[in-house]
Image (cartoon, rainbow, N blue to C red):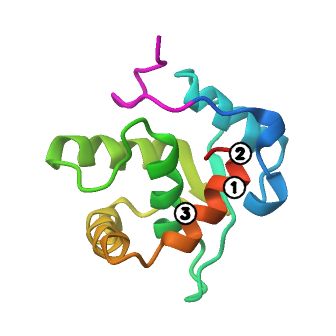
Amino acid sequence: MFKNNVQGFSFLPLSPSRIDTVFFGFDSNDVENLLRLVNGLPTEQKIVIRETPKNKQSGNIRFLFTFLDLIVRGGIFRMDTKPKEALNMLISERFTFQNTEINPSTLPSSYSKWCSATHEGNYDDVRKDISKALGIS
């Protein structure tokens, strides 16, 4: 039975001992809240994404999209409108960039750019690094 009911998404199981906390910059609260998320439970705090993009903004939304694409059952690549709205809500409610709120108005355009770049293979290396850091194949 897959865990569900987090904005309609179900997640792949993750093993806390296999998550590379240094790669993600996760502290113990982030890991605990990530495990709560993938198990369909409410998080106690937002999960902090500390990966910093080249443009020096507070966080890297495309990194987060790639991360979610790997842990959401079926991925998030090229979703229809309703699932995208649920994705935006999931991101806004469950994640933060170095404790800075994620601007929901930037999510649709960032998602479109991420889909195009992913289709072109631009995130293949990031995908491999994230998969390895999560301990998934």
In this rendering, would 57 be left or right of 80? Answer: right
Who's the residue at 78% across and 60% down the image?
25
Above or below, comparing residue 16 to residue 108 in the picture: above
Label 3 belongs to which residue?
127
User: Among all residues in the image, which is located at the extreme top?
Assistant: 1
Above or below, comparing residue 86 to residue 12 in the picture: below
Who's the residue at 48% across and 72% down the image?
123
Above or below, comparing residue 41 to residue 89 in the picture: above
Which secondary structure type mostly characterizes the magenta part of the structure?
loop
| Residues marked 2 and 1 touching at CB (< 8 Å) | yes
Separation of residues labelled 2 and 1 (CA atoms) = 5 Å
| Residues marked 3 and 1 touching at CB (< 8 Å) | no
Label 1 belongs to which residue?
132
Residue 30 x %, y %: 73, 43
Which residues are drawn in magenta? 1-12
Amino acid identity at mark 1:
Lys
User: Among all residues in the image, which is located at the extreme front?
Assistant: 137
Residue nearest the viewer, comparing 51 with 17: 17
Residue nearest the viewer, comparing 119 with 69: 119
Element carrying mark 1: helix
Does the rendering let one see residue 44? Answer: no
N-terminal-most mark, 3 or 1: 3
Label 2 belongs to which residue?
135
Amino acid identity at mark 2:
Gly
The reply to whether the magenta stretch includes residue 135 is no
